[in-house]
Amino acid sequence: MDSCMCSSNDVPRTGETAAPILELKPVHSPSLDGRAGCETWSVEFSPDGSYFAWSLGYGIVKLLAWPLQDIGRHASSPDIGVLKNPKDKTLDCEQTVWGLAFGPRPAKSAGRTYDANQEALSESVALLLATGLNNGTIKIWEVITGHLLFNLSGHQGVVRDLVFAPNGTLTLVSGSRDKTLRIWDLTKPGQAAHVLRGHTSWVYSCSVSPDCSMIASVCRGSTKVYLWSLRSYTFIRNLGDIRMFLVSCDFSPDGALLATAAFASNWEIDLWDPYTGDILVTLQECSYCNIEIMDNPIRAVRFSTEGLHLALVTEDRAMQIWEMGQEKPVIETEVRRFSNGLCCTFHPQGGIVATGTRDGHVKFWRVPRTVPSLSHLSRVALRYFTSTHQVMALPIPSKLKDILTYRNLQGHQEARCILHR
């Protein structure tokens, strides 16, 4: 693994163009004839932030102890990545890796009461990494040793996305090109998974709500979001019809919002109330940039840990960070015709976003750390346990209800980039 680092560690100020603080490059160069195989389809941090997983193409996953040894240094030498942490591991999955997920994910969301049983389970179970492969297999690895524990079989197509339930258990949800979601209990690896059918095409993305009541999913060529019950393993309903093709989805940390990314000739982010099906906020691509780059797909959207920011990757920009309710990005990268970006993820303690690219690279970006307001913390604490319908039934002023249900942010806005304010 080679890596190179830019010459600055400073966090960009709001409205500035960002530059990566570190770039990891794979050993194998992209194929000259353009064949697939080298893509970084997924990057993930472990729930405690101690490991970073990188699918660097050709069936290889790197497990890197975090922080990386050179993440805090000023350097420009291309050889600074030769120093390796003994905790680092290389996993040979023997198939193209599309999805990554660490588990178990402890229930540590803001406002959640302490559950001694779940906390004990999380601490007693070794940190695992699930890898979703091209042949439909899911491999389960022990992170600390790098040993393969077992395989999960059942999908009949590429396993495109994976996510552990955020409740400290070993419940794993997988989405596949075979048009299904499967729910696995990793404490019983020989037991058949619960299968959720009904997608019209390949499943692109799935997300589990923080209270583990719902799964959201989006599929290829579809303009609707699918909602499923994780408790009864049944279909709940579709959300809307936005007349764009959905590619990514992510629940907010309190579960009160669902972010979706979609595109046609331009891209769009929608923030849904998953309980009512209402779109509360729509963020659309800057029309000036759309003139310059007519076909600009969006690849991924992710909520930050505190729930105030969204990271997104588009064809023309390697990364953008948006704060909810603002009309311009907090930070964004330079416009390029092809950014090669495919995926993104926040570090669980904030301050860093990682993005993966089509040529197998990973870039790390510093992002501002935000101290949430007391009103936001209170809202997150309440909404973790309370549905929109329950909030609306409370004997409180309507203005307070709007804040608690995020309807104070309601509206449609155009994403004004830094160059075209």
Image: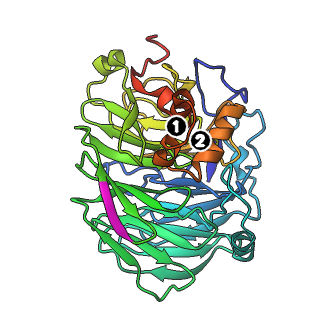
Tell whether position 368 is magenta: no
- At label 1, the amino acid type is Ala
Going from N to C along the chain, the mark reached first, 1 or 2, is: 2
In the depicted view, which residue is nearer to us: 272 or 4?
272
Residue 233 placement (x, y as % from top left): 39, 71
**Residue corresponding to mark 1:** 311
Find out whether the residues at labels 1 and 2 contact each other: C-beta distance under 8 Å. yes
Q: Is residue 333 visible?
A: yes
Q: Quadrant of residue 149?
A: bottom right
* Above or below, 95 relative to 69: below
**Residue corresponding to mark 2:** 304
Q: Which residues are magenta?
A: 233-237
**Quarter of the figure with the N terminus:** bottom right
Q: Residue furthest bottom?
A: 190
Label 1 – label 2 distance at C-alpha? 7 Å
Residue 18 placement (x, y as % from top left): 59, 26
* Above or below, 133 relative to 303: below
